[in-house]
Image (cartoon, rainbow, N blue to C red):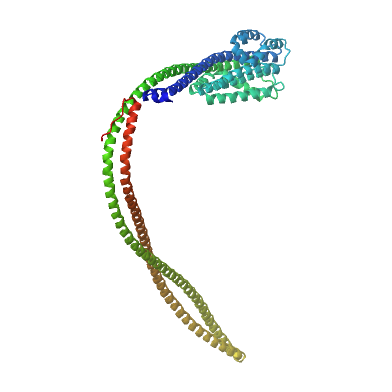
Amino acid sequence: MTMWKKLNLGTKIALTLVFPMAGLLVFSVHGVSERASTARECRDMGKMAVVTNKLGDLVHELQIERGRSSGYLGSMGKKFSAELPPQRAALQDFEASAFGAAFQRAMDGAVGHLAELGRRREQVTALKVAAPEAIRYYSGTIGACLDVITQLARLSRDAGVTRETITYTSFLFAKENMGIERATLSNVFAKNEFAPGMFERAISASAAQDAFLKTFLSLATEEQKTRYASTVRGRAVEEVARMKAVALERASQGGFGIGADAWFDAMTQKINLMREVENGLGRDLSNSTARIRAAAERALALVSSLTLAMILLSVVWGAMTIRSITKSLKELIRTLGDESEGLTSRAAEVAMSSDQLARNATQQAASLEEASASLEEMTASVRASTDQAGRAFALSTKNRAIAEAGVAEARSMTEAMAAIRTSNIGVGQIVTTIDEIAFLTNILALNAAVEAARAGAAGAGFGVVADGVRTLARRSAQAAKESAEKIEDSIARSEQGARMNDKVVQGLEGIVLMARQVDELIAGISEASQQQNRGIEDINRTVVGLRQTTQLNAAGAEESASASTELDVQAGSLHEAASALALLVGGKHGISRAA
């Protein structure tokens, strides 16, 4: 510890930078190592891409042999007997050992299937195996090889390579199911009927083919889609579709009328077109892995160069920083020495200013006390005005409610008088009817009297009755006339009362309108009074805050006066600290303070 204290500041800073530099070196080495690992992985991916293309060739040849073997078995050796031996010879270049020990370990399952290839061929040649079993063997072998290709997508950590690998394998699986369909229907056309289980196998292969093609098209680039659309087309593709349609239409009865060799040739031409697309996809995958490997190698070189440059730059920058800090500290020491001299004189000036500020703050506090008292009186007056405006608003609201009730009652009276008038009109009609009946009765009585006179003595009694009826008819007519006059008078008076009531309603509605306007005016006055009250209260609070602030300023001024005395003491301490800092940086002696 004593040794550390004896070191100057530059040496201490240099020793302090050693640990960050060591950490930087460790992380840099780690970054370079990681980039080197990525470059190695990319090289391995490139090798795997090459092996994948070779394995695709193997799968293609196995698919052809599977189709010819199926047709051979279906025709009981009558068809494809000449084509099968050359096709088997084409596979001699695809021994598992040709791919290297590393690849052979990665495809143990496929190698196990390939080991059975010789025995299975002998069974096919001797017609000692059923077509479905032979197709299952070849399909299992091809599936194991395709599973090895699928592993490339799992080994890569690059999203682009993974996508292209899945695109490639989806296309291979679609082509594989196309090969299964070729082998299955070769057997079917050779027998001219669907053997048990062969129809389901054909439908399954066709559905799987469509599913994998959809996956391929959903992941492929536009260039790959265009290449597929422009390659897989033509007469062979159309002929395959036609033959499949015939097979499905006549699946139950057989008798397709299609030769197995014609189906095989057309389907092989279509698969060869698919093979061209497959080769293009393989080249795309190889090119992608090559680009990624080149990018990884460039990144490794760049990271290595940047790491070395950063280490050198850090060393140079550390030396320059130490020199700059030492120089700045020396300038700071000189500045501190100068400032400590002027600080003592300024402390006295602060003491005088603080005393004057305290006296001014005391006077200001007294003035604020008076302003606060005046504001409190004004607040009480405005509050009283607000209360009175509120009561006036309540009374005005009550008067308006009474006037509105009067309007409602007057409207009800108008409706009642209209009903009375309607009733009087009905009664008048009834009286008119009675008058008409009396008139007709009088005419009838007159006719009866005439008839009684003609009858002579025999009709004397009937004439007396007729005279009585005429008398009653005249009295009824007279009474009906008087009733009609009274009813007409009543209707006229009802109409006059309705007109007067309408005027009353209009007057009350005017009163209600004026009451509402008064309500609005009083409400505005009340709201203005409340706002004024709140404004005065805000001012009052502000004044109280100013009063408190002034008191605090006065107290602060007194504290500043006492602090100025301490400031002089601290100026001396600052001078001593500057001297100690000068010794730390490497000076020979401290800074002298003026008396």
Relative placement, left or right, of 113 versus 362 is right
344 or 386: nearer the eye? 344
Please say whether residue 191 is visible from this viewpoint.
Answer: no
384 or 98: nearer the eye? 384
Residue 386 in the image: above or below residue 58? below
Question: Residue 557's x, y, as percent?
Answer: 31, 48
Residue drawn 60% across the image and 88% down it? 462
Q: Quadrant of residue 202?
A: top right
Q: Can you name the residue that lies furthest to the right here?
A: 128
470 or 264: nearer the eye? 264
Please say whether residue 471 is visible from this viewpoint.
Answer: yes
Relative placement, left or right, of 439 versus 387 is right
Relative placement, left or right, of 108 versus 507 is right
Q: Locate the C terminus and report the quarter of the image it occupies.
A: top left
Residue 438 in the image: above or below residue 289? below
Residue 260 in the image: above or below residue 444? above
Q: Quadrant of residue 98?
A: top right
Q: How many marks?
A: 0
Q: Can you name the residue that lies furthest to the bottom here?
A: 457
Q: Can you name the residue that lies furthest to the front here?
A: 595
Q: Quadrant of residue 68?
A: top right
Q: Locate the N terminus and report the quarter of the image it occupies.
A: top left
257 or 446: nearer the eye? 257
Question: Residue 146's x, y, as percent?
Answer: 60, 18
Relative placement, left or right, of 344 versus 282 is left
Question: Residue 17's x, y, as percent?
Answer: 41, 23
Question: Residue 13's x, y, as percent?
Answer: 39, 24
